[in-house]
Image: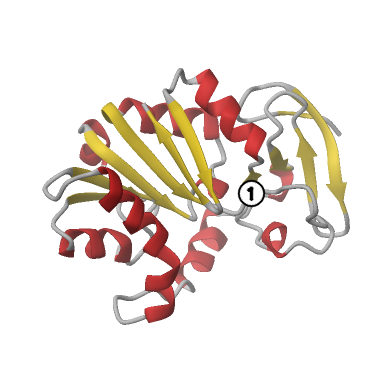
Amino acid sequence: MKHHCPLCLTLADTFFQDAKHHFLLCPKCQGIFRDPDQFLSPIDEKERYLHHRNDMEDQGYHKFILPIINQVALHFSKGSHGLDFGCGHTPVLSNYLKNEGYHMSVFDPIFFKNHNAMNDHYDFIVCCEVIEHFYNPAYEFQKLFQTMGPNGKLICKTHLFEEGIDFDTWYYKNDPSHVFIYQAETMHWIKNNYLLKDVKIEDRVISFTK
């Protein structure tokens, strides 16, 4: 069964299918997206996120988010304004950045649904393991880029699919809340489509510059 890509609206065909998963590959933006018939219910999705145990004392999680913190520190001076978008039930990343001297706001569509935060403008936005959960990435990216000031950055962390990965055994596709998986080509499509200045891919950290 074909579906339209939720990022670029191009009609896409099956890329991978087994008893539990059905993913389609967009021929235009190279995004890989889950069949909407497999989306979790809002209750099941929230329950899954509540099992994420992230706290300020977890050194393993600090190591996990450190590449994002380093990107912020590299490009923005203390006192800059940032948004932690999709912060989850415990906004650890924004708390670390606050401790580093940045002014942070948070937004999460389930746990911190503060729409006032989305009406402000920011020097930078951080999204740690968030963009793969976008049901409507075209809308979400448009909204994020609109809230960024000139030369602002959207700093994301996600696991890109690339040559050499066996999708059949790949752990990342097994999370039922992962509904849109990106390739490097997808990131460059986003950069060009939204008329951004630059995109840089450094391992799992992707930075867009407005």
Query: Depth check: 90 or 77 in front?
Result: 77
* Residue 47 seen by the camera: yes
| Pointer 1 residue | 160
Residue 85 image point, x, y percent = 35, 47
Q: Is residue 124 left or right of residue 50?
A: left
Residue 95 image point, x, y percent = 23, 64
* Residue 113 seen by the camera: no
Residue 122 image point, x, y percent = 23, 36
Above or below residue 50? Residue 153 is above
* Residue 15 falls in image quadrant: top right
Name the residue furthest front. 74
Q: Residue at x 48, y 33 (%)?
A: 199
Above or below residue 37? Residue 192 is above
Q: Residue at x 27, y 45 (%)?
A: 83
Query: Depth check: 184 or 7 in front?
Result: 184
* Residue 190 falls in image quadrant: top right
Query: Depth check: 1 or 173 in front?
Result: 173
Above or below residue 155? Residue 1 is above
Residue 3 image point, x, y percent = 76, 30
Q: Residue at x 71, y 32 (%)?
A: 30
Mark 1 secondary-structure assignment: loop
